[in-house]
Image: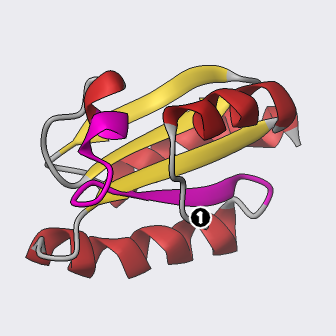
Amino acid sequence: MQIESLREIEMLKAQQVSFCVYFSSPNCGVCQVLKPKLMKLMTEEYPKIKAFQVDTATHPDIAAQLGFYTNPSFIIYLNGQEFFRRSRTISLQELDESLSRPYGLMF
């Protein structure tokens, strides 16, 4: 699901227990390769964390306001609080290791 404004992220923090946001642009090769792998990990291993996407080519202001100045970038919120943040080099193994315990405790 696409996010179109920073206000939407703020509303998600208040409404969703947990969610993640992937920042990428259509002309970023790394972004296009990483996105399906990341989304597969999230849907298979962490299905209760809803995934969203921001197109930084269309909405660079959203990424900049959250401190992301490069693609790809990824952020996870647990209980409305920022839990995991990475830019440029995103390790799926590191994400899995960091998220498995808190996810198990929450859900």
From the viewer's perspective, tell me whether residue 43 is left or right of residue 63. Answer: right
Compared to residue 95, the image places residue 57 above or below, namely below
Look at 73% across and 31% down and name the residue there.
11
Q: Is mark 1 on a helix, strand or loop?
A: helix
Q: In which quarter of the image is the N terminus?
A: bottom right
Residue carrying label 1: 42
How far across and down, in percent of the image, does residue 9 sit?
60, 36
How far across and down, in percent of the image, does residue 89 sit?
15, 49
Look at 54% across and 63% down and name the residue there.
2
The answer to whether residue 98 is visible is no
From the viewer's perspective, tell me whether residue 62 is left or right of residue 8. Answer: left
Q: What range of the chain is rendered magenta?
A: 48-63
67 or 47: nearer the viewer: 67
The answer to whether residue 71 is visible is yes
Look at 46% across and 31% down and name the residue there.
84
Magenta stretch: includes residue 59? yes
From the viewer's perspective, tell me whether residue 44 is left or right of residue 41. Answer: right
Name the image quarter holding residue 75.
top left
Name the image quarter holding residue 15.
top right
Look at 69% across and 59% down and name the residue there.
46
92 or 29: nearer the viewer: 29
How far across and down, in percent of the image, does residue 43 sit?
66, 71
Q: Residue furthest top?
A: 81
Name the image quarter holding residue 58.
bottom left
Q: Which amino acid does label 1 sit on?
A: Met
How far across and down, in percent of the image, does residue 30 sit?
14, 71
Instruction: Estimate how packed mark 1 is, as few (under 14), some (14 to 19) or many (20 or more) residues with alpha carbons within 10 Å.
Output: some
Compared to residue 92, the image places residue 1 above or below, namely below
